[in-house]
Image: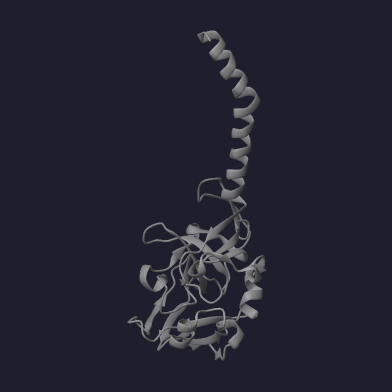
Amino acid sequence: MNIRNIRSWFYTLWQRELRPMLAVLLVVCSMRSSLADWNDVPTGSMKQTILEGDRVFINKLAYDLKVPFTTWHLAEWSNPQRGDIVVFFSPHDGTRLVKRVIGLPGESIELRDKHLLINGKPVAYDALDGEISGQLSGTEQRESLFAIEQLSDKPHAVMAIPSLPTPRSFGPVRVPKGCYFMMGDNRDNSFDSRYFGSVERDRIVGKATDVVLSLDKEHGWIPRAQRFFRSLDAVESH
């Protein structure tokens, strides 16, 4: 095959296959960047709402529209609300994290012996349904404390692990303008705003809304079918 034939073959390949495939790939990646995406959760910092091995759906249009592949905002129509589970880039090292919005801009956030206070007012806690904590291993159930945190209109499960040497009190701190205070539901095992500070609005990728699928990594990555396609709100209120 001479050079002319090679060029002709490559040009035909480009026109008929490579260029359409590249166009489709660009569209798909742009949609994932600006409209919707998923996030695999490798740690237990959001137990019990989100477990290790869950893949959560991210609604990137929940608050704004961004330029694909950037954090530049083309338009904003909403802001994160207290209790929302959001995905954001950590101010510490840029890692993409999943946490819960606890404090809004201008608010005072404090922990006193594991109990949360917002603007000086204690948040109420109730007993947790045993069926929820039953999703965890026997060791975790024995070594942890569980409760329902009545955070605004979004009550959710929280847990503490007394054996871990982590601070049980924090603050009070004031959330800066244009920032949000994030915490994990697994309060003694979460690297969050208590360590790296409040998160700027521009770092927030979107709102986590559903568990798309779930694999149990402690048992050979067996699918947890009961968690497939479940709203995170439904998981929290179960």
| Residue that lies at the very extreme toward the bottom in this rendered image | 127
Image location (x, y in percent) of residue 133: 55, 83
Residue at position x 57%, y 88% in the image: 128
Count of number-bearing discs: 0
Residue 95: percent from the left, percent from the top? 42, 58
Examine the rendering and report whether any part of residue 208 can be seen. yes
Q: Quadrant of residue 150?
A: bottom right
Does 164 sit left or right of 82 as displayed?
A: left
Name the residue: 32% across, 82% down.
165
Residue 201's x, y, as percent? 50, 61
Frontmost residue, 140 versus 24: 140
Can you say whether 69 is above or below 7 in the image?
A: below
* Vertical relation: 197 (above or below) 236: above
Residue located 62% across and 71% down the image: 232
Expressed as whole percent of the image width and height from the top left, the position of residue 224 reads 60, 69
Residue under the point 44% across and 72% down: 175
Task: Between residue 124 and residue 120, name the one nearer to us.
Answer: 124
Nearest the viewer among 172 and 22 is: 22
Residue 160 lies, with reference to residue 212, above or below; the image says: below
Q: Is the residue 225 above or below the residue 58 in the image? A: below
Kindly give the residue lying farthest to the left in the view shown: 165
Image color mode: one colour
For the C terminus, the quadrant is bottom right
Q: Is residue 119 visible?
A: no
